[in-house]
Amino acid sequence: MADAVGVRPEAIKAVPVRHPGRWVAAVVVLAIAVYILYTIGTAIGNDRTGLGPHTGWLVVEKFLFNGLIFRGILLTLELTALAMLVGVVLGAILAVMRLSPNPVMSWVSWLYIWFFRGTPVLVQIFFWFNINLVLKSIDIGIPFTSLWLHGNTNKLIPPFMAALLGLGLNEAAYMAEIVRAGIISVEHGQTEAAQALGMDRGLVMRRIVLPQAMRVIIPPTGNETISMLKTTSLAFGAGVTELFTRQQQIATATYDVLELLIVASIWYLVMTSILTVGQYYIERHFGRGATRQLPPTPLQRFRRMLFTFHAGPPAPPELVPAGPAVPGSEHR
Amino acid sequence: MPMVKAEAVHKNFGRLEVLRGIDLEVNPRDVMCMIGPSGSGKSTFLRCINHLEKIDAGRLSVDGELVGYRQRGDRIYELPDAEVCKKRAEIGMVFQHFNLFPHMTVLENLAEAPVRVKRESRAVAADRARRLLERVGLAEKVDAYPRQLSGGQQQRVAIARALAMQPKLMLFDEPTSALDPELVGEVLDVMRALAEDGMTMIVVTHEIGFAREVGDTLVFMDGGVIVEAGKPRDVLANPQQERTRSFLSKVL
């Protein structure tokens, strides 16, 4: 037997340990979940109008693809995108200011974050919505010259703008902290290596530090975007006709309060689900170089799963073909 | 004119005096190796040469110009950032932990600074990058990411990255200290070839063998001062100072 180099002994086939506790727990949890869903589902389905059974679900179906709801969805998406844009851009600036060697910059940034993170978004939206009560016009220009722009506050800050300012400026405070955490997560040796090559501060930040910080910045930013999508419903307070306001308008007319809340919930869920998938791919893109191999896309994972189900017992390691098993999973 | 000239260079971090008067000269095409116990100030001195650290007293010049300062009459002026960057671009540096840019491929690591700092065209930079990679024996790794390489390969890429800027001086900060023993040789081979091509090099190292074979001068530092300097063979075979002797007896 000593000369049998490379002969592989038979793979171990052991009787697996049974876990009866797991089965009991699973059945109990499922039973509770089914009971709750059934109770609420039938309650909504109950006839309250005398027009026939399952009216509630028919109402949901009727308004799910309603034109007003669609316009609300569009406005929700618009508000989310713009507020996040304001948040990310301003947040990045605030983060760089916070880390600046100039004490005034860092102090102003700290103050901004302290204020906007410390007051509720709804208060901020209401603040911008009502700013015209005290500030009748907004003037921007260069002192001691005639280059001044004059604007009426009422026209400059319509409800949509009030909501955008409230959401975006608040978001910037959170994004600033996220970006700052990302920047300081990049090893100092990276900055030194870049400096040793003659790169200046801006170049080091843009080309070396920020791209690596992205790996740390993206996941919480995805969370922020998903959170923002839902927080836009607070624009209801400023009378912006986004999804929540729209369903509320229809509900007050038809009294199908719960049904329309379900309609809105379905659409919020659809949108957040799409964002979750998008986030996965963006994270994958910025993960380049962080691991030896990119994580597979869900599609690749699915194909690989089918592949392994069909394959027999695992081959000895030296027989597995080198490199990625699925085409297209190499680095870009 | 010496490539590097240090006169009474002092450096302190707060109360701690790290360099307490360093005097030395490195001539063009020479290889100077620096050895000494950790905390002796070797790395700090190296980092002062490209102004990653600011010196507090004395004079330090590269190729006849002060590092990080300009002298007019009796007055010393700090150099603006842009000029410090320009000076650094002429000095290559290799770090103990390689510090390759992990989000870029090997080729991008090499081409980044020539394109962004020296404003070379992408084609010219990529062309030189390929030739340098061939020189360090990694021609087939152009499109790999740093994490896909072994430590020795990463350090060879890091050397090629520094050379891509066509420096007149190369600084090596313990380039083999973070490597597995069997990978040290490939990095030292690249450095030896570089020395034979006439590159001016300052090497902080623990590789006594390399210092003996490749170095033109050997400097032993301890406690922020140069204890002993001379031809590597003389210093190693016949150390004059007690501190040198006790250090060498521990590492040899």
Image (spheres, coloured by chain):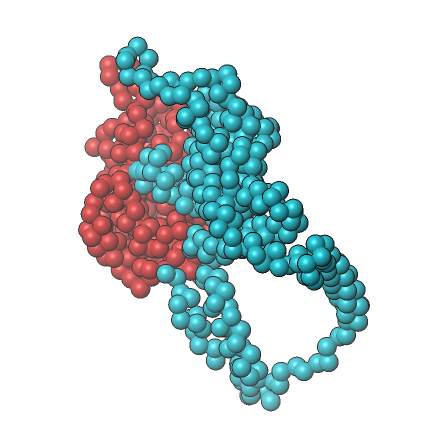
Chain colours: A cyan, B red
Foreground: A49 or A241? Answer: A49
Could you tell whether B93 is left or right of B123 in the image?
A: right
Q: Quadrant of residue A1?
A: bottom right
List x then y, in percent, for residue A252.
Answer: 62, 42
Q: Is residue B18 above or below residue B147?
A: above
List x then y, in percent, for residue A105.
Answer: 45, 24
Foreground: A167 or B239? Answer: A167
Q: Is residue B179 above or below residue A190?
A: below
Please say whether residue A54 is visible from this viewpoint: yes
Foreground: A320 or A226? Answer: A226
Q: Residue at x 42, y 60 (%)?
A: B148
How many numbered callouts? Answer: 0
List x then y, in percent, for residue B235.
Answer: 38, 42
Q: Quadrant of the C terminus of chain A?
A: bottom left
Q: Residue at x 35, y 35 (%)?
A: A202
Q: Quadrant of residue A328?
A: bottom left
List x then y, in percent, for residue B91.
Answer: 29, 39
Could you tell whether A256 is left or right of A226 in the image?
A: right
Q: Is residue A198 above or below residue B81?
A: below
